[in-house]
Amino acid sequence: MDRTVLPIQPPPHDPITVMDARDAVKPDPFVVDAPEGAPNIVVVLIDDIGFGATSTFGGAINTPTFDKLADNGLRFNRFHTTALCSPTRASLLSGRNHHNVNVGSVMEVATGFYGNQGIRPDNAKYFAETLKQNGYSTAAFGKWHETATWEVSVSGPYTRWPTNSGFDKFYGFIGGETNQWDPVIFDGVTKVLKKDDPDYHFTTDMTNEAIEWVKFQQAMTPEKPFMVYYATGATHAPHHAPDEWIEKYKGRFDAGWLKLREETFARQKEMGVIPENAQLAPMPSDIKDWESLGPDEKRLFAIQMETFAGFAEHTDNEVGRLVDAIDEVGVLDNTLFIYIMGDNGSSAEGGLEGTYNELVHLNGIFDEETVESMLEHADDWGGPNSFPHMSAAWAVATDAPFKWTKQMAADFGGTRNGMVMHWPNGFEAKGEIRDQWHHVNDVASTVLEAAKLPEAKSINGVEQIPMDGVSMLYAVDNSDAEDRHKVQYFEMFGNRAIYSDGWLARVVHMVPWVGKPRAAFADEKWELYNIDEDFSLVNNLAEANPEKLQEMQDLFEKEAIENNVYPLDDRLYERFNAKIAGRPDLMGDRKTLTLAQGMEGILENTFLNVKNTSKTIVAEVSLEGRDKGIILCQGGKFGGWALYMDKGKPAYTYNYFGLERFTISAPSAIKADKAEIKLQFDYDGDGIGKGGTAKIFVDGELVAEGRVEKTIPAVFSADETADVGKDDATQVADLVFQDVEESEFTGYVDKVTISIPN
């Protein structure tokens, strides 16, 4: 059986010459089974958490499941990611470099240049497809973030959704983040409602689904191995955790981020997860000294870290439930369990102060919140009424012993993540550390070697490009094995580096909480480090060894060109606009969109872009009296707008990040059983995020007028939707509607057209 060409075809057969089936000999059925003894595969990928966060790698956050698997398996302390969400996932699942599969950054900021277009090619299929076509059952749970933004509408195509990317089953969210209390969930390609549970949390929900699937699959086909890709939305913002998990950390971080970092560093040396000669990299100069802070600042920042820690431990506990379920069905020993703590380092995208609503900073706005305003939400921090992110200082602390954070592809604080491998039937070593240098693109080759499967040369008739990664299994029973991953480039928003056989050269181009380049690409100075002697990248050898630096720069140039890294693109907020970025837009040049009752769940990147412009909404509605409910809305309670009815009166609310709400309402109810309701918003112009005047007309007559003093410039939400006839997740007009059921329109939207100027 040639397993390098997929799908595997049945062998040719001779014609049967016997007429009567009763007299003929039945041939053996053609079945593609997995190789004998092939293990189950579980890949766990946690979001936005750094090397120095967890107890397993010396951190302060308790992660007993991670600890247990490490104690009975292996810790890898030189395992690397790409510094950002989508690229790490594409690299992990494909076994290739992220630009090589056209995912140079997150999907929402894809551009028009190959390497960054966000369209995953057919010639680099995910290893789940190889497993599936070789007799595995495959399932993905949690965060996807691997589908181009213009391919997430009812119009498809669904070719790059999980269930067409090698997975038989998908249950999770399609974008980059979700509200853990009120997620937008898909089962396959079908949007489903959140389960009715007062204690609902998405990480628990996805774990329940994963456990049910594994148990069902093993009940039906115990001889068939399974593969589970379990990728939590945690611990990406919003940092949402049940109160009891946050309470476990009350007071634990009152000594501040410098103390946390120093204590982590000491434990890391004691545990041996960093070498004895490692140095603690200096903190970025922007990070304030804890002792210089006032009591309010200390209180706020402690709450932020307590919430993040509770969120992380809660997540690890859910992973533990999955481990226990696999053990209950008796197959844990023959399950290769790869637990990756972070798709990048901890996130500094909350800025230097942190934020009650991380969408504020995602829009490039850093002056709307103060310590005092955030403390007003202290009791809600981490709960359903918050959308929070911690201070960048905590990100640096939990990325110890390194200097930088998520997005920083030039530093191990952005790219080095703790990884544990557990497989009792596969290797004998337990509780040991492996320091071979590896990258997330090595996971696919590792899985295929464990499953005794070759790398596919052709899948579904398309010749496959070779994988860039190497299997890590050579190191599991040989701690002294020579590294096999010799060269690796890194690049993200102009931050870039090249690793080669013990050396790293880099450019720190842009810091997340600053959001603009330190210098033009052509004017930057490269740095050089000998990482065999300098674990934390502290001693820059560029001046002392210019020949080696030039060699490394030349190698980066070669790798960049071969992997479609060029052109470098350091634009951030501009790239949220499809026209500026140069990527396809489902709406194209359209200026109007007409919808009707029941058309809902339209994700932001497949809706008309109404930001930074005037807009008009004209709705033809049938009424039943003192009607209430949504006519048309977009976004949710942490940012968006809604045209609705309240006690028979048409009204419009613009929700500015949950910080301010601007509402214009008609003074009296509509008495007719049909009406044309028009919302006209005249944007002030002259820039982004400006305000405007909103007017409401009923059957052509002006009935209300008022100001919206400011608007959201770049993004309303990561996964909240536009909906007709109800607000399908959290409520934009949250002071009027408490939940989805209450927002359902009691009348009927016959037609609603939204327009922007030509």
Image: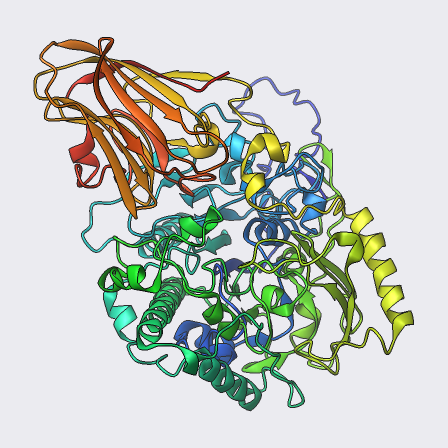
Q: Residue at x 51, y 53 (%)?
A: 227
* Image-quadrant location for residue 438: bottom right
Task: Please give left or right for residue 88 compared with residue 695 in the image.
Answer: right
* Image-quadrant location for residue 413: bottom right
Q: Position of residue 404 (x, y in %)?
A: 59, 68
Q: Position of residue 720 (x, y in %)?
A: 36, 39
Q: For residue 162, say whether it is visible.
A: yes
Nearest the eye: 328 or 207 = 207
Residue 80 against residue 579 in the figure, above or below: below
Q: Residue at x 50, y 32 (%)?
A: 686
Task: Please give left or right for residue 202 compared with residue 106 in the image.
Answer: left
Residue 312 against residue 554 in the figure, above or below: below
Residue 234 against residue 638 in the figure, above or below: below
Residue 681 against residue 166 in the figure, above or below: above
Q: Residue at x 66, y 55 (%)?
A: 517
Q: Quadrant of the N terminus?
A: top right
